[in-house]
Amino acid sequence: MPFLRARAAAPAAEHHRVDAALDLAHGCSLRAGVFRRSVTEWREESLYPGLKVILLDGQVRSRVEDRAPLALRGPALCLAWNPGQAQGADAFEAGVDQRYTVVTLPAASLWQELGVAPDFLPSDGGPVIWHGTAGREARRIADQVRVCRYEGPARGLYLAAKGLELAAIALAQAGQAPLPDERAAAPSAAVRDLDAAHEARRRLAADLRGAPSSSALARALGLHTRKLEAAFKRAFGVSMARYLQEARLTHGRELILSGGLSVSEAAWHVGYAPAHFSVAFRRRFGVRPSELR
């Protein structure tokens, strides 16, 4: 996965799963997924020529030209504006799951289609790099992209809208316009509930085969089950059960397509009995899992 770069060379990866992918006209795109490198090594390549917004929940060192390397530990939000030609390099920490959401917007699209002024970021002709901690709103968008509920034309519209929304948040957080103070605007109890929802999402995604129940999560996070369910739905737009089902089926499909596993093996890895997996898979994707092999 390219971090600041234009494109990625074939990575040394133990695992790579794509959760969402969208390519629009003129080079606009959105990608989301997770990968894990088997070795930590610097990889050099050209920076993307335009605006690139990255939300990364992982660990990476990145450098541009001869500048000092950045050391990022997620969840981090990064904005890279490259108006010309520049070189960069990344070194992803081996053995660490790197969850990413990446939006690219070429300069021509910014000027001609979105009406963004050419001087929206001050630059001396070289690249401009900004990074900061990803706030709850940016993390919420990244999770919504990974668990998109729509199919067909609606899916493309939804992902395009979420990509632009994430880019807007990054620009605002980088200093173009102040973001509202979420903690000042919301009662402290509501903030704690949202943080608990994000932690619940992290724990569900961390162990798809043995994912905890909603009541067990609520006990561990110090909330009533109903309150945690409500906070999760507000944060991600789906229930915990729907989120877990989507994550299990999507990961199961990837294991069959790229992992060389049988349907029964894939079902076991994501916490399904084979028969139940096949039924749920067909309802979700419109084909039997055995038809993928």
Image (spheres, rainbow, N blue to C red):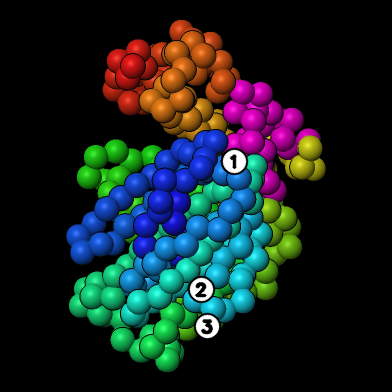
**Position of residue 192 measured from the top left corner of the image (x, y, whole percent):** 72, 55
Q: Is residue 205 left or right of residue 53?
A: right
- Residue 31, relative to residue 178: is it above or below? above
**Count of labels in the image:** 3
Residue located 46% across and 38% down the image: 17
Q: Which region of the structure is painted magenta?
A: 196-219
Question: Is residue 178 inside the magenta stretch?
Answer: no
**Between discs 3 and 2, the one toward the N terminus:** 2
Residue at the spot 33% in from the left edge and 16% down from the top edge: 293
Q: In the image, residue 262 lies at what x, y percent?
A: 45, 13
Q: Viewer-proximal residue, 213 or 20?
A: 20
| Separation (CA) of disc 3 from disc 1 | 36 Å
**Three-letter amino acid code at the position of disc 1:** Ser
Q: Check disc 3 and report its element: helix, strand or loop.
A: helix
Q: Tell me residue 289's x, y (percent).
A: 36, 17
The relative height of residue 52 versus residue 60 in the rendered view (above or below) is below
Residue at which label 3 appears:
175
Question: Which residue is found at the position 73% from the left and 37% from the top?
Answer: 218
**N-terminal of the two: label 1 or label 2?**
1
Residue at position x 31%, y 57% from top? 29
Viewer-closest of 131 and 35: 35
Q: Which residue is mark 2?
A: 64
Q: Earlier in the sequence, mark 3 or mark 1?
A: 1
Label 3 or label 1, whichever lies nearer to me, is: 1
Q: How many other residues sit within 10 Å of disc 1, few (<14), some (14-19) or many (≥20)? A: some
Left or right: residue 150 versus residue 213 is: left
Farthest top residue in view: 275
